[in-house]
Image (spheres, rainbow, N blue to C red):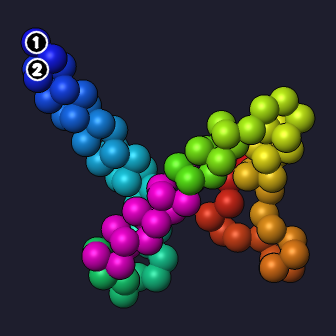
Amino acid sequence: MAQEHAALHAALHAALHAALIDRVEAPFTPFPPDARTEEITRTSRMRVGIHKGGLELILAHEDAEREAMSRNRRTPCSATSTRRSWIHTP
């Protein structure tokens, strides 16, 4: 029974990961038009990985610190860039 549960969990995790990558790839597809599929997939996987890392960091903190980190995750980094990223979602 435990082995079946682990297999189901792995299958659901793989399906969720694939769906996340697909959703992240969609906005990249038209930019730039000559981009190869592998480049778009690699970029999308990096974005998902960065997002997951940010969530883990937020969950490792509590109360006001967690709220501040959560707010910062949704804000473009003004210290390194003066323009807004086209892929930023508020």
Q: What residue sits right under mark 2 in the picture?
A: 4
Residue 61, quarter of picture: top right
Residue 82, quarter of picture: bottom right
Is 18 placed left or right of 29 in the picture?
left
| Depth order, front residue of 11/86 | 11
For the residues bearing labels 1 and 2, Cβ distance under 8 angstroms: yes
Question: Quick one: label 1, few (<14), some, or many (20+) residues within 10 Å?
Answer: few
The label on residue 1 is 1
Q: Quadrant of the N terminus?
A: top left
Q: Judging from the image, what secondary structure is the residue with disc 2 in?
A: helix
Is 50 placed left or right of 4 in the picture?
right
- The location of residue 14, given as percent across then percent down, is 25, 42
- The location of residue 21, given as percent across then percent down, is 37, 54
Decide whether residue 68 is among the magenta residues: no
Residue found 51% across the figure and 62% down from its top: 47
Is 30 above or below relative to 16?
below
Is 76 above or below relative to 16?
below
- What kind of residue is marked 2? Glu
Magenta residues: mostly which secondary structure? helix
Decide whether residue 48 is among the magenta residues: yes
- Range of the magenta residues? 38-51
Residue found 29% across the figure and 36% down from its top: 13
- The location of residue 58, given as percent across then percent down, is 69, 42
C-alpha gap between disc 1 and disc 2:
5 Å
